[in-house]
Image (cartoon, rainbow, N blue to C red):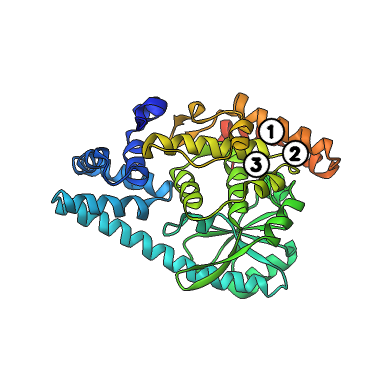
Amino acid sequence: MTTSPMSLFSKIHAQNEIFHHLSVLLLASEDVIESEDSVRWFSNLDESDTAKVLETADTHHVTVRAFRVLQRGAVQQGDRALADWSAAAVAAEQDRAQRAVVFLDAICEGLRSTGSQVLVIKSLEHWPDLGSDLDLFTTSDDRGVVLAMAQRFHAEVLERSWGDRLAHKWNFKVPGLREAVEVHVARLGQTGEHIELARRLAARSVIREVHGHGFRVPAPEGSIILATLQRMYRHFYLRLCDIVDLATLLQKQAVDFDDLRAIAEPAGIWPGVATYLRIISDYVEAYAGYGLSLPSEVISSAKFGGEELFCRGNFLRIPIFWQGAKLYTMQLSKTASCGNLQAFLRLSLLPCLGAAAALEYKATGSDKGVW
């Protein structure tokens, strides 16, 4: 029996109806009547509401995937104007993504010239959509990265926050490239606590062909871990692309869950990985009528599911207190028990950094200088 999406997520979609209709386009089966209802909903929007839909799809990195479905539905219903609008939105996003990929290929080659390994992380998970910046991981050092970006691409180093410095992240503005380039140097995690984890992900990386270019990217297990670090241990919110990306990954590629746990557990983030998988499975089940195919050990290790999500602003939020705090405490405890003093000390700075970011945001309306 198909679960109604309004059952578990009714409050969310009452607060943001756009989430519901985009989710239908992205996740519901083609023969589900809700898809037809959503196409009619889009066709009745005025110009202001249409702009909000486009902004939301762009923020969630699902423009191409959602509006391709919308275009087909509009054609089937004979709505020429909606079909043309959808096609134009898809074409504009594809053009942006394809231009960025050309730059990305050159940047990867430039960083590899330092003799280091370079992975594209997170950005290509959304393909044929693309994120708002280009994320890379390199085994190089800070000096080598900055020199390569400046000398080869005349890149400008963007201002670094305290969090960026702690995590060993650099952000660059490359002339001619709309997207910023974010480079993680030898470390991963919100405080740069993961060194061994980063090495393992790099060692298990694979080559992926995108728009005629070959990029080294994390293996499926690495992609899940990186998404978990970003969503469950840093930002505490989900985007629609996170849900679609993971659903697509598990449908198209075999994930070795034993290997996933073996990588995540020593780093103290296995509970977060399991929780992330369960949340997304719940969301997919609400729309597709079936969840992700998850082993029993994943379900039992998850600390909560989709019932904890709520909507604020333009995102699906995960409560920081107490759910997020619980995951952080478990990570800190595991790190201490493993005797990883350096990682423990870095992680222990996180509450202070979060408090400083909150004060900065209250005073200036932005936490960029801190977080």
Which label's residue is closer to the chain start, 3 or 1?
Answer: 1
Which label's residue is closer to the chain start, 2 or 1?
Answer: 1
Q: Which mark is in front, 2 or 1?
A: 1
Q: Which mark is in front, 2 or 3?
A: 2
Given the image, on which type of amino acid does mark 2 rest?
Answer: Leu
Q: Residues within 10 Å of mark 1 (few under 14, many from 20)?
A: many
Given the image, on which type of amino acid does mark 1 rest?
Answer: Tyr
Residue 167 in percent (x, y) is at: 70, 49
Q: Residues within 10 Å of mark 3 (few under 14, many from 20)?
A: many
Q: Which mark is in front, 3 or 1?
A: 1
Given the image, on which type of amino acid does mark 3 rest?
Answer: Val
Residue 173 in percent (x, y) is at: 55, 62
Mark 2 and mark 3 in contact? Answer it, CB < 8 Å: no
For residue 135, above or below residue 13: below
Which mark is on residue 282? none
From mark 2 to mark 1, how far is it between C-alphas?
Answer: 9 Å
From mark 2 to mark 3, how far is it between C-alphas?
Answer: 16 Å
Which label's residue is closer to the chain start, 2 or 3?
Answer: 2
- Per the image, the residue denoted by label 3 is 370
Residue 72 seen from this side: yes
